[in-house]
Each structure stands twice: as structure tokens, then as C-alpha cells.
Image (spheres, rainbow, N blue to C red):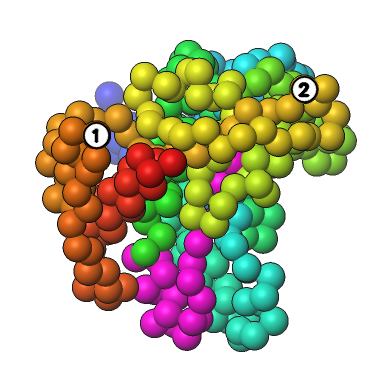
Amino acid sequence: MSSEDLQAQLSEEQAKYAELEVLYQNIIDHSTEVENELLENNNKIQMFLDRMRRYLSPQLYEMITGSKEDEASISYQRRKLTIFFSDIVGFTTITDSIEPEILSDCLNKYLDVMSSIAIKYGGTIDKFIGDAIMIFFGAPVFENDTAHALNCVKMAIEMRDSLPALDEYWRKSGINHNLTCRIGINTGYVTVGNFGTNERMDYTIIGGPVNVASRLEHASEPGGILISNATKSLIDEFIETKAKGEIVVKGVHTPIETYQVIGLKNEQEKKENPFLKFDGEGFLLKPLHFDKISTDPEERRLMRYALEKALAALK
């Protein structure tokens, strides 16, 4: 083969190599574009998921996104749940005298704290209606009836005990209102699932026990946690209560026995409560000094417990 033929063959091979190099670079550029497009789409999806997470309870979010066993296809179920209602005492009067921006900030702060406590105890936040909150335990994740009722009551106690710090925040923001809540809790069989239209669905609960829980909240004293006998029977071993009489609820044939939650049953706490000491058939209630600013939440809780126990003994 002559040198001219070798040179021609070499030039041909170089041309093929150059074409391959261009093709390779085109493939790299194209794959980079695809990768960037996928990354951008993934970021958009994650942004939408993060937004959706803010509008749904953690349990419902996981159910919809498939992080756990998919129950989204189930239209509805009959389940025994523990239902919680709460609202802020006198909130309507506040709205007439406070600037909307300040009120919105303070209400969002309140709802944020309450939501964090609800998530901590595994509650499914059904909805916010202004200052009112509706939560239920037992769906979509089921454990057992006692655990649901106990977690709900523990949640309510912690919510109640968190109010003094929130009250201080409200006062610093310019709302001179004693932040107090009413809470009602009931346990019973309800229908839980997806209700709505093709355009909009809600995962919620319906049934008589829901109405009873709402009625208990309205009947509760300011600062009180009022529960039904159905709930009390599940948590009696762990929670101290006192009878508050019966209420009549429309649509329920028999009166509902009600009980006010005092606190967790803890023999050690009873012995070491610094403000109350039982002696034989009576008790010694030591002097209390309460100040909204300097008295910390733990002292408030012990004071409340001591006063409630003393009043119960007097009755």
C-alpha cells in the first residue's frame, strides 16, 4: 500500500473519529439537558409535596403519597375513634378589637403550638375552624382503643399546660386577653374516610360521637377538659378525673355522663407536691404565690393540681 493510500485511510479514520466525538458530545449534552430537566421537575414535585404537607396531617400525607400502606382507595370505614374538640374562650370578642395582622400572627402561633403537640401524640388533625380545632385518634393509623384515648387526653393536658406561655406571647403582641381554652373528648364508632366530590375530597369523620365531642367542648368550663364516660372507661387506670354530671345531647337517647380531667395519676407526684399534703382525713394547702410572668409552667401545673385536689376533697 502506497503512502498516499495510507494517508487517505488515516484521514478517513480521523474523520470517523471526529464524527464519533461529535456524536458523543451531543449525547453528553442531551443527557445533561435531560438530567437538568428531571432535576428541575423533581424540585417542582418536592415543592408541591412540601406545600401539600402543610395542609394535611402527617398520617394523611403519608397515606396519599404512598409512604405507608395505601389506604387512599378505601372510600370509608366504620371505626372506633377518640375525638377531640377545642376552642378559645371569648375569641369572638377579641376579633372586634384587635388589628387583623396582630390577631392572625397570634392565632397562627397558637395553632402552630397546638398542631405540634397533636403530631407528637399521633393525632390526625381534621380541621381548623377559626380558633376551633378538631382532631381524632385511631385513623388512618390504628393501634388500640386505650392507646388512642390515652394519647388524646395526654395531648389535651399538654395543650392546656402550654397556654400560659402562649398567653404571655399574646400579651407582648398587644392582646390583653386571658388565653383560656375549652376542650371536649369523646370515644365512639364513627364513619371515617374520603367524603366530597370529584373536584375536592376531605378525609374526615361523621357520626353521633362527633356531635357528642363537640357538645362536651361547649359544656366544658374555661380551662377544663371534659370527657365522656366512654373515654374515661378506657383511661381510668392512668388519668385522674372527677364527675361533672350528665348532659343531654340532641340525637342521643340517653344522657351522657361527663368527667373533668385533673391530670395523670402519679403516686410519686402526689407525695411530693409542694403545695398540698394530705393528713389523715384532711389536708394542708400551703400558701401559693402566683405571678403571670415569674411563675413557670411546671409551678402552674402543680398549683392547679393542688387546688383541684383540695376542691375535690372539700366536696
Kind of residue at badge 1: Glu
Q: Relative to 191, is 221 on the left or the right?
A: left
Q: Which residues are magenta?
A: 165-184
Q: Quadrant of the N terminus?
A: top left
Residue 24 seen by the camera? no
Residue 175 seen by the camera? yes
Viewer-nearest residue: 117 or 85: 85
Q: Relative to 24, is 260 on the left or the right?
A: right
Residue in view at x 67 percent, y 33 percent: 246
Query: Is 176 part of what is drawn in magenta?
Result: yes
Q: Position of residue 10 (x, y in %)?
A: 30, 35
Query: Is 189 part of what is drawn in magenta?
Result: no
Q: Residues within 10 Å of mark 2 (few under 14, many from 20)?
A: few
Does the residue at mark 2 contact the one at mark 1 (Cβ under 8 Å)? no
Q: In the displayed orientation, state which residue is furthest to the front.
A: 281
Question: Residue 13 is drawn in which quadrant?
Answer: top left
From the image, state whether disc 2 or disc 1 is nearer to you. 1
Viewer-nearest residue: 164 or 127: 164
Residue in view at x 48 percent, y 13 percent: 144
The dot on residue 281 is 1
Q: Residues under labels 2 and 1: Cα distance?
A: 37 Å
The dot on residue 254 is 2
Residue in view at x 67 percent, y 60 percent: 130
Q: Position of residue 265 (x, y in %)?
A: 30, 30
Question: How many discs mark residues in the rendered view?
Answer: 2
Q: Which type of secondary structure does the marked residue at label 1 adopt?
A: loop
